[in-house]
């Protein structure tokens, strides 16, 4: 089964999209901010990340940069 990491700070949008994706047969893991997204993505393998770019704590742009720079697999980069 394809696993998707859904990163969205708006809880209603995150829940609605997660339900729709699950209905289509995807496994969904959700995060509410960029820092949580980086931690989840480094802790478990995912096939696709749907990343909101305007996020609290750590925006989607920086979270994506950290994930792209992270060795795979291996230790996580230090989070700001």
Image (cartoon, rainbow, N blue to C red):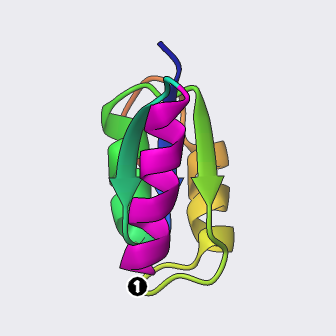
Q: Residue at x 52, y 46 (%)?
A: 20
* Farthest top residue in view: 1
Which quadrant of the view contains residue 78? bottom left
Q: Residue at x 33, y 51 (%)?
A: 39
Q: Residue at x 57, y 48 (%)?
A: 67
SS of the residue under disc 1: loop
Would you name the residue on which mark 1 appears?
57
Q: Is residue 76 above or below residue 59?
A: above
User: Does the segment drawn in magenta span residue 18?
Assistant: yes
Q: Is residue 2 above or below residue 27?
A: above
Residue 70 is situated, as x and y percent measured from the top left of the image, at 55, 41
Task: Please give left or right for residue 68 compared with residue 55 in the image.
Answer: right
Q: Over which residues does the magenta segment extend?
A: 9-24
The residue lying toward the viewer, choosing from 71 and 4, is 4
Q: Is residue 9 above or below residue 69?
A: below
Is residue 8 visible from the viewing direction of this image?
A: yes
Which quadrant of the view contains residue 59? bottom right
């Amino acid at each position: 089964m394809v696993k998707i990491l859904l990163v969205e700070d708006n809880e209603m949008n995150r829940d609605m999209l997660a339900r729709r994706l699950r209905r289509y047969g995807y496994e969904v893991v959700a995060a509410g901010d960029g820092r949580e997204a980086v931690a989840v993505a480094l802790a478990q393998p995912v096939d696709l990340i749907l990343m909101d770019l305007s996020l609290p704590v750590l925006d989607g742009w920086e979270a994506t940069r950290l994930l792209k720079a992270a060795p795979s697999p291996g230790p996580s980069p230090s989070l700001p």
